[in-house]
Amino acid sequence: MSPSPPALRCRGLIKRYAEVTAVDGLDLEVRAGECFGMLGPNGAGKTTTVEIFEGLRIPDAGEVEVLGDWWRGDGYSLRTRLGIQLQETKFPEKLRVHEVVRLFRSLYPRGLSVDEVMDRVGLQGKANAQVRTLSGGQKQRLSLGCALAGDPELLFLDEPTTGLDPQSRRQTWDIVDELKGRGRTVLLTTHYMEEAERLCDRVAVVDHGKIIASGTPRDLISSLGAEHVIAFSIDGPGAASVDASTFLDLPSVEKVAREEGGWRLTVREVHRAVPALLAALAERDAAPTRLTTHHATLEDVFMELTGRTLRDD
Amino acid sequence: MSELTRARVLELIREPEAVFWVFVFPILMAGLLGVAFRSRAPEALPVAVVAGEHAEARAAALSAGADVAPRILSAPDARLALTRGQVLLIVSNDEVPSYGYDPTNGESRAARLAVDAALQRAAGRDDAFNAGMAAITAPGTRYVDFLVPGLLGMNLMGTGMWGVGFSLVSARNGNLLKRLIAAPARRSHILAAQLTSRVILLIPEAGALLLFAHFALGVPIQGSLLLLIGVSLLGALTFTGIGLLTAARPRTIEGVSGIMNVVMIPMWTFSGIFFSTERFPAGMQPFIQVLPLTALNDTLRAVMLEGAGLAPLLPDLALLTTWGIVSFVLALKLFRWQ
């Protein structure tokens, strides 16, 4: 049985602006029916890349194949098969929700009914409300609804939950889950690792216009070599004399990293590492002022690969 | 495209400021300016007679006819009254009178003729014949009749351009245009929907002004109503097309405002809205005649006040059409969608 063709494929993608190379030789492939995430900090080149996939920007080099087709002319026939949600789209303030959905639905030859779209994104109750009366979360769901109106084979979501409160974020995740349940392909970009871990079957980690790692979230975390992280800061007379070598030999410790204000240990077993750590510190006349442990996340993967965090706040 | 048009129309009619500028403002203008410049029954021309030995007799001679209203004032008072425009002429107190007046002022000149005739007759001059007089007032010769077609033209230009300019620049900044072209919306349809929505709103807009002007102010509509609607339609489309072109590139509201001002201010000044284009020197006429608003105002006046048919209007209509088509095509080519 031959696998179905990829929903999207690109090779050697390059895009430059003035002195900045936003996309620096990027290859990727999205399989039909999967939810694929591009995870990286702001300015990594995710939006530029996605806009090239969406046919809104022309790359300086490289090939892009979307649903087995290429961008040429006005790309009309390809656009009827895609759903595109852009960051921060401002809909006309005085139009009502159902009027906006109806407008976008009218652009596609086939798709869901206006009522179905509003149902899917939970805006049935707001059908008659003007856009200006909607909350941030509701506006974002409207935007998502307009991307779904044509019942697309491939859906692009650019930073779908940026700036939303936690409840709106979860509501959006539920909508994407439902899409996945119906076998649609989704490509999303995000700088939230929880979003990538929660929604994506596979993730590409993007930094400075390149993919620095890709795979399932689980595989990426496993690549750390250990699945738990202990983060702590220390104080005390012996604190200054503490360095990486103090911790490397402790049982179960895989990696040691210095970070702003403290240390970060990647360990295999917390229950063995922590007591050993506390003993080692006491020996050196230092004590922890803060100590937390968590299961390794994609944020830790990113930090491991680049030495920086995903968030810039 | 009907959906794009429908959405645009809904957007437009829900803006309260738009409703004011499109409907209320031109009616207000026509009403107020019509009142300010209304034709008045001819009034007697006020003149001053400087006090002295001849004053009484001369004032009596001048009062005999209905044309002149004399008053006797001291010399300095008379000078002051002339400066203030309260009198049009000063009759001196000399044996042979001399007249002080402003030769550049039409009414002042008329006063001189009337005063001289009255005083000459009083001194014994005989008329050679008694000419007959018949007052002729034709409809469509008042200032308000001249004004209304100009206001209609100005309004068609204004709503065509402001409405399109601001909304497109906001849509560009808010990523809405980008969102539309990411979806399978044809670019020509997005721009054409601006034209069609304008046409739909033209009917109440021009209709309101014309109904008010015709029934409340008595402005005549001599020519074919169909032709008048057709000309208005063409004007609306042309200026919406020009509006699309001005909105094609700017990224800011300030930018598009600046461009629209550069386009509209010359036409407000030169295109004969408030006064005839003939007041400008001959050297400027070629420039003035090529402006689209001049063509529109001229054709509107021709239809409303002179009852002109289609044939004499064709050159101006062709000019308008050319402006409209060229603007639309250029706009589509140059348009910045993101």
Image (cartoon, rainbow, N blue to C red):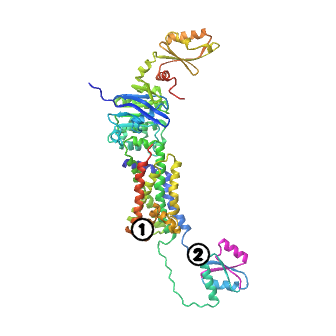
Q: In the displayed image of the protein, which residue is found farthest to the left?
A: A1
* Residue labelled with disc 2: B106
Image quadrant where residue A109 sits: top left
Residue A121, can we see it?
no
Badge 1: chain ID:
B
Which stretch is magenta? B66-94
Residue B191 coordinates in the image, percent (x, y): 41, 49
User: Looking at the image, which residue is at 52% across and 49% down?
Assistant: B255
Q: Are marks 1 and 2 on the same chain?
A: yes
Nearest to the eye among marks 1 and 2: give it: 2
Chain letter, disc 2 residue: B
Quarter of the view holding residue B74: bottom right
Q: Which disc number belongs to residue A26?
A: none
B329 inside magenta stretch:
no
A297 vs B55, left or right, is left
Can you say which quadrant of the picture contains the N terminus of chain A? Answer: top left
Q: Residue at x 41, y 44 (%)?
A: A99
- The x, y position of residue B258, in whole percent, is 53, 52
Amino acid type at circle 1 is Val
The Cα–Cα distance between marks 1 and 2, rounded to whole angstroms, is 31 Å
Residue A308 drawn at (x, y percent): 52, 24
Q: Which residue is mark 1?
A: B303
Residue A246 horizontal side relative to residue A122, left or right: right
